[in-house]
Amino acid sequence: MKKSQALGTGLLLFALGSFGVAVRDTLRESAAPRSAAGVPASQKRHLSIYILYGNAKCPTCEDIMRLTDETLREDFAAAQSRREILFSSANVEEPGNEWYVSTFEIFSTSVVLALYDQGRLVTWKNPQEVWDLAADPAAFKAFLRREIQSMLSFSPQGPENP
C-alpha cells in the first residue's frame, strides 16, 4: 500500500509540475509582443498594421476595417509585397490575443500602426481619429495614408509613441 501511495503522490507532483510549466509557457507566449503573422523575429524594419476588434462589431467598426483594407490595397501594395508593411487582423477576445489589449492599450475596434525593427517593437500608434473619419471615405483614406507615411519615416530619436 505504501508503494502505491508513494507512486500516486509522485505522479500527482509530476502532473502539477507539468501543468505549472505549461501555464508559464502559455503566459510567456501570450504576453510577448510579436509582429504580424509569419514574420521572423529577425525581420528587418517593418510596419505592422493591425485591425483589432471584439466579438461585437458595429457598422462604424465595419467601415473602419473596410477603409483600412482599401487604403492598403490602393496605396501600399508595393510596400506590402516587399514586406515593409504587414497587415493582419485579430479578435482580441479570442484566447492568445490578450497581448494586443495590454500592449496597445485598446478598448474598442482599433487600427494600430506598430513599427518593428529586428523583431522589436520600436513605437506604435492607435489613431482614434479613424472613428470620426469613418463616415467620409476620402478623408479617412487621406488621414490613414499620412499616418502610415509618418510611421514609416519615424526615427527612434523621437518620442516613444508619436
Image: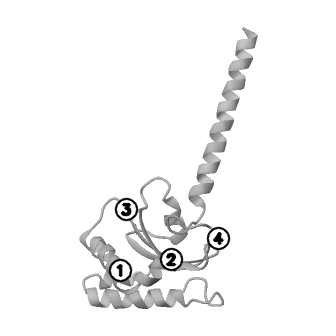
Which secondary structure lies at badge 1? helix
Badge 2 amino acid? Arg
- What's the distance in space between the residues labelled 3 and 2, CA to CA? 27 Å
**Residue drawn at 72 percent across, 24 percent down:** 10
**Residue drawn at 50 percent across, 55 percent down:** 96
Quadrant of the frame with the C terminus: bottom right
Q: Which mark is residue 55?
A: none
Residue 38 vertical position relative to residue 79 in the rendered view, above or below: above
Instruction: Quickly name the residue at label 4.
Output: 42
Which secondary structure lies at badge 4? loop
Residue 120 drawn at (x, y percent): 63, 73
Which secondary structure lies at badge 2? loop
Q: Does the image show residue 126? A: no
Mark 4 closeness class: few <14, some 14–19, many ≥20 residues within 10 Å? few
- Of residues 51 and 126, which is closer to you in this image? 51
- What's the distance in space between the residues labelled 3 and 1, CA to CA? 24 Å
Badge 3 amino acid? Gly
First in residue order: circle 3 vs circle 4: 4
Instruction: Quickly name the residue at label 1.
Output: 73
Residue 57 vertical position relative to residue 155 in the rendered view, above or below: above
First in residue order: circle 3 vs circle 1: 3
First in residue order: circle 4 vs circle 2: 4
Instruction: Quickly name the residue at label 2.
Output: 83
Residue 64 vertical position relative to residue 75 in the rendered view, above or below: above
Mark 1 closeness class: few <14, some 14–19, many ≥20 residues within 10 Å? few
Q: Does the image show residue 160? A: yes
**Residue drawn at 59 percent across, 66 percent down:** 40
Residue 31 drawn at (x, y percent): 59, 60
Q: Which mark is residue 54?
A: 3
Kindly report which numbered mark, 3 or 4, lies closer to the viewer in this rendering. 4
Quadrant of the frame with the N terminus: top right
Residue 77 drawn at (x, y percent): 40, 81
